[in-house]
Structures are given as C-alpha cells and as structure tokens.
C-alpha cells in the first residue's frame, strides 16, 4: 500500500477498506507513516468524512493499537460513562458512586481538562492524596473490591488515538464527527466495559455548538458500539449555560457531594439521577426507569451513595474525611462577589465565556501540562430564567489574589444577556439515542 494513494483517494471522496485502515493506523503508531502524511490524511477525512463502516473500522484499529483491559471478563456487568465536555460538568462525580451504590460496578478511566471544559481527574485531585495513575493490577483490584474505580487515562490504551489527537489539535481537524467518535469510542472499548452511557453536549459551552451536530455524533458513537457488541446509549443534553452553580475543581466536587446528599442544584441533580437510572435499566438492574429512580432515591436517602464516593476516594489513597466533611476541601484565599448590573430576567449565559474566566483564575489549562489550582473557580448565584434585582449577588469569584478577581469581572458580566420579560428555560435532556434493534 502507498500512503499518498490513500490520501488522494480520500481527498477525492473515496472510501478505505478495513485492511487499509488497519495498515494506516499500524503504520502511524509504529512511526513508518510520518506526521506530514497523516496530517494530510486527517484533513482529507475532515473534508470528505467517513461512512459508518469506515468509522467503526478506524475505532477498532485504534483499540488494537495497544493494550486492552477487558474488564467485563472479570466483572460483569460493568458500566462506563463519558461526557463530551462542558462547563460545570461534575456529573461523573455523582453518577459513578450512585450507580455503584445501587449494585452495578463502574470502571471509569477519565481525562484532565483542556480549554474551557473541566476534567474529572482534576476535580478528583482536589482531594488530598488521591491517586489517579493506577497500574492495570490496581485498577482491577479496586474495581473488584469496591465495585468502582475512577482512574486517569492510560497511555497504553489506544495509543494511536493519543498520537492522532495531538496531531489533530495542531492541524485544524478536531471538529470531525468520524474522528471525534472514533477517538472517544476507542478509549472506551479498550477499557472493555459491558455497557456505556454517553452524554453528548451541545451549546455555547460544548464542542458541538448545535443540537444537530450533537445528534450526528451521538448516532455515530451508538452505531460503533452496536457494531462492537458494546451496549451504548447516548443522551443529548444542553450546555447553553453552565451546569449547576459551581465551576472549578474543589467547588465542583463539593457540589457533587451535595447532589449525592439530595440537595444539589435542580438542573445538574436531574441529569445525574436520570443518567444513573438509565445505566441501571441498561444493565437489567432495574426493569424500567420508574424502578431505577426508586433505587437511586434509596441510595441517596440512605447515605449509601456518598459513602461509596468516600470509599473509592480512600481506596485510591485520598482523604475520605474531605468527602464526609467538604469544608476540609481546599478553598481559595480570596472571595469577591460580583453584583448584578441591572434588574431583570437572565436570558442567556455564555457558558464558554464563563469557562474561560474560570481558566484565567487558574482552574483550567490553556495548554496541555499547565498546572491547575484546585481552589479557584466561580459560584453562580442565578441561572437562566431567574429574576435578579440590580445589586443582588450574581457571581462569587474564588481567586488566588484580588488582582485576578478584578481582572475578570467585566468579562464575566459580558457573558450575561438580560430580558424585561420572563424567559423560558429549555429542557436539559433533549433526546436519548438507543441502538437500533
């Protein structure tokens, strides 16, 4: 095979065979295909796309480029959950222990934040001593002993994806549905859960900016799961404003703990409880969503859900007392309240702008490898649809120093749009995509 021939074929709208895709991924992983040729191929894919069979073949080739955990051969059922990312998205921190507390194992490898979207790993590392870098043996031991493990991504799993993602990041080929779908699904399939729930977000704070893009991505990933015998369901959810009230790391973990106690913000709590219930139905733990909701409610009211979070924190070396008493979590030395500049209903909040402001405080990364300050972030005091009086609290800034807090205030206020009339709040969960039978 000749790489240039494959590049020109895709450039002209052609398709690749299964064997050609395997050859390309093996060659790039092993270094026999150089970056400049793979960059050209990625741009051709970005412009011309891939059909469902090609996308599935690409995913499997990336899965086979490295080790596979195959957790479902030792624990079954075992579920995984993935979000495409957003602002204030602490859903995994609540859903994983909720599902485990209901008797279904959760084997989760998760990533760090990059850009305006936060990372679950960074939020977990707000806890003193918590270890996300686990060996294969430790991952399986903790999963078997505690029915839940929350680890960082392993570079040994789907290494082709790591190389391709780094190249996509610098060649303007990130926003390609086949490339996004195969990237996400290759990492999930390499872990080897039996059931996967995807949270595909759209809106100002998401990578998919509109609902149709999110739907196309969701359909592509559910189809990949179906072809690979991985039971996959996708929820399409709105990220037109930050999720919940907290944006940051330690303060988002604190909010997740509130959700597990049943006293979290309504929007993010609803999403967490629904996704936990969906996983219970997917695995057969509950016959229907109504029964699953009862199991979720019981796990919250009994305290089993928050105890399960404390349990996995302790199992991975963290200080479980910080879960039992969130006041022990790290806090920023400076808190500044930003008042509402006018009276009215909040009509819109630019979630991406809020996320970028939080990054400026140190809560996120502008480039890979940047340090994160787990103490900093933002606490919203009102959401879309709320009526706020001029001068009333709007946003609480958690900062390292007064200068950083002062520097972002005008940018924060620019994220808000106001209305004199009541504003309709759109549903958070817009659609559920299930595999075709």
Image (cartoon, rainbow, N blue to C red):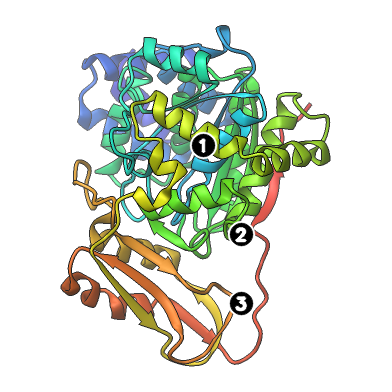
Q: Quadrant of residue 321?
A: top left
Q: Secondary structure at mark 1?
A: strand
Q: CA distance from mark 3 to mark 1?
A: 28 Å
Residue at 29% over, 42% down: 169
Residue 269 — which label?
A: none
Q: Residue at x 45, y 17 (%)?
A: 142
Residue positioned 65% across, 38% down in the render: 276
Q: Quadrant of residue 167?
A: top left
Residue 165 appears anywhere in the view: yes
User: To which residue does mark 3 refer?
Assistant: 385
Quarter placement of the C terminus: top right
Cβ atoms under marks 2 and 1 closer than 8 Å: no
The residue singled out by tag 2 in the image is 267
Residue 19, x across and y down, in percent: 45, 11
Of the image marks 3 and 1, the number of the one nearer the N terminus: 1
> Foreground residue, 126 or 51?
126
Identify the residue under disc 1: 82
160 vs 342, nearest the viewer? 342
If you read the primary sequence from the N terminus, does the residue marked by circle 3 or circle 2 appear first? 2
Quarter holding residue 336: bottom left
Location of residue 189 with respect to 173 vertically, above or below: above
Q: Position of residue 87 (x, y in %)?
A: 44, 56
**Looking at this view, is 64 or 23 the one in front?**
64
Q: How many labels were placed on the picture?
A: 3
Tell me the distance, in whole angstroms, between the alpha carbons under discs 3 and 2: 12 Å
Between 424 and 391, the residue placed more toward the observer is: 391
Dot 2: element = helix
Measured as percent of width and height from the top left, residue 334 is found at: 24, 68
Say if mark 3 contacts mark 1, CB within 8 Å: no
Assess disc 3: are there few (<14), some (14-19) or many (≥20) residues with their C-alpha within 10 Å of its C-alpha.
some
């Amino acid at each position: 095979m000749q790489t240039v021939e494959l590049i020109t074929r895709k450039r002209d709208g052609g398709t690749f065979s299964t064997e050609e895709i395997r050859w390309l991924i093996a060659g790039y992983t092993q270094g026999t295909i150089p970056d400049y040729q793979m960059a050209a191929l990625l741009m051709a894919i970005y412009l011309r796309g891939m059909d469902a069979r090609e996308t599935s073949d690409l995913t499997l080739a990336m899965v086979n480029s490295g080790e596979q955990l195959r957790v479902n051969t030792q624990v079954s059922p075992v579920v995984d959950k993935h979000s495409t990312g957003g602002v204030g998205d602490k859903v995994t921190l609540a859903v994983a222990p909720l599902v485990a507390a209901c008797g279904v194992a959760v084997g989760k490898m998760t990533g760090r934040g990059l850009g305006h979207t936060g990372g679950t790993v960074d939020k977990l590392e707000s806890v003193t001593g918590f270890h996300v870098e686990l060996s294969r043996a430790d991952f399986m031991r903790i999963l078997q002993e505690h029915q839940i493990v929350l680890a960082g991504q392993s570079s040994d799993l789907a290494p082709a994806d790591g190389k391709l993602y780094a190249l996509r990041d610098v060649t303007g080929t990130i926003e390609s549905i086949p490339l996004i779908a195969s990237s996400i699904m290759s990492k999930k399939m390499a872990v080897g859960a039996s059931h996967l729930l995807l949270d595909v977000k759209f809106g100002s704070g998401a990578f998919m900016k509109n609902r149709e893009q999110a739907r196309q991505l969701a359909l592509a990933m559910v189809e990949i799961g179906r072809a690979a015998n991985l039971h996959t369901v996708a929820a399409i959810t709105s990220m037109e404003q930050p999720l919940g009230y907290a944006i940051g790391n330690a303060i988002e973990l604190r909010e997740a703990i509130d959700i597990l106690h049943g006293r979290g913000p309504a929007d993010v709590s609803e999403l967490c409880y629904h996704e936990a219930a969906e996983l219970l139905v997917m695995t057969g733990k509950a016959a229907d969503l109504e029964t699953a909701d009862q199991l979720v409610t019981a796990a919250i009211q009994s305290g089993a859900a928050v105890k399960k979070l404390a349990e996995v924190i302790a199992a991975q070396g963290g200080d479980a007392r910080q879960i039992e008493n969130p006041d022990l979590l790290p806090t920023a030395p400076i808190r500044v309240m930003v008042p509402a500049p006018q009276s009215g209903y909040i009509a819109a909040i630019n979630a991406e702008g809020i996320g970028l402001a939080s990054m400026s405080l140190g809560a996120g990364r502008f480039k890979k490898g940047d340090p994160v300050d787990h103490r900093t972030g933002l606490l919203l005091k009102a959401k879309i649809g709320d009526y706020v009086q001029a001068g009333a609290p709007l946003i609480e800034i958690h900062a390292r120093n007064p200068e950083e807090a002062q520097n972002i205030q005008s940018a924060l206020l620019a994220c808000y749009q106001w209305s004199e009339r009541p504003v309709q709040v759109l549903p958070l969960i817009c659609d559920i995509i299930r595999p075709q039978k």
